[in-house]
Image (cartoon, grey):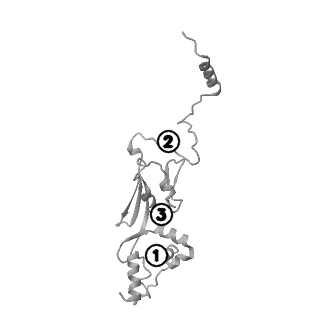
């Protein structure tokens, strides 16, 4: 029987005394680097469903759909398609709605285990034509970011009034209030039509 080499014998003795060189993964995972792009996680309270992450995702790992009957917008994240490029985090409108975690042990045996993640928000519709404007959370985020300038935009003014529990439009029993068409949620096309009708009569 051949005798072991001295180097191999030395490594065996050091492993017995100091422990193995290899990590104890998966029982004790090694910490990831601070800038590691791990599992993508949504913050439902900070995400406004603006759709920016859906537009920039090169792997089509995100989809957005509007349920016009229930009046909600739904964003779906497909983890099994994600390539962890970080575009969604970089171009997030609020910079807080989506982020990379430090979790990297994401291997799954079946596709079903990588379940889809869904975020839902209430939609705001144009009160004249019924077109989807955006989500209520998106309007509120813009209004709070704009500060006092939000009161120059009727849509932002209305969403803030509703958020604070105030009556946005005085409701008269017999005649409509002055400029009642202005104080409605309107898409850009209908807003332009209302202004042209007031100024030019058509």
Number of marks drawn: 3
- Nearest the viewer among 187 and 28 is 187
Q: In which quarter of the image is the N terminus?
A: top right
Mark 1 falls on what kind of element? helix
Per the image, the residue denoted by label 3 is 48
Q: Quadrant of the C terminus?
A: bottom left
Helix, strand or loop at disc 3? Answer: loop
Q: Which residue is drawn at 40% across and 60% down?
A: 74
Mark sitting on residue 105: 2
Numbered label attached to residue 155 = 1
The residue located at (56%, 37%) in the rendering is 28
Q: Where is residue 170 in the image (x, y as percent from the top left)?
A: 46, 84
Lateral position of residue 139 relative to residue 23, left or right: left
Q: In this view, does 160 lie above or below 109?
A: below
Residue drawn where x is 44% and y is 81% of the image? 183
Q: Where 196 falls versus 130 (above or below)?
A: below
CB of mark 2 within 8 Å of CB of mark 3?
A: no
Tell me the distance, in whole angstroms, between the alpha carbons under discs 2 and 1: 44 Å
- Mark 1, residues whose alpha carbon is within 10 Å: few (<14), some, or many (≥20)? many
Image mark for residue 10? none
Between marks 3 and 1, how big is the CA–CA gap?
A: 16 Å
Q: Nearer the viewer, residue 6 or 49?
A: 6
Q: Which of marks 3 and 1 is nearer the N terminus?
A: 3
Q: Position of residue 159 (x, y in %)?
A: 48, 74
Picture quarter containing residue 55?
Answer: bottom left
Measure the C-alpha gap from mark 2 to mark 3.
Answer: 28 Å
């Amino acid at each position: 029987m051949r005798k072991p080499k001295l180097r191999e014998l030395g490594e065996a003795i050091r492993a017995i005394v100091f422990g193995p060189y290899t990590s104890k993964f998966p029982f004790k995972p090694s910490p990831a680097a601070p800038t590691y792009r791990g599992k993508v996680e949504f913050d439902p309270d900070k995400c406004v469903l603006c759709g920016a992450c859906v537009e920039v995702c090169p792997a089509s790992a995100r989809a957005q759909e509007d349920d016009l009957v229930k009046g909600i917008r739904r964003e779906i994240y497909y983890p099994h398609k994600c390539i962890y490029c970080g575009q969604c985090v970089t171009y997030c409108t609020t910079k807080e709605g989506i982020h990379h975690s430090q979790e990297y042990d994401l291997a799954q045996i079946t596709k079903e285990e990588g379940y889809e993640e869904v975020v839902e928000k209430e939609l705001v519709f144009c009160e004249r034509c019924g077109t989807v404007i955006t989500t209520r959370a998106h309007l509120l985020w813009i209004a709070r970011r704009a500060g006092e300038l939000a009161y120059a935009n009727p849509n932002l003014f209305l969403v803030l009034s509703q958020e604070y529990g105030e009556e946005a439009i005085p409701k008269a029993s017999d005649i409509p209030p002055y400029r009642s068409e202005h104080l409605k949620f309107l898409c850009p096309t209908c807003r332009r039509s209302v202004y042209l009708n007031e100024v030019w009569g058509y």
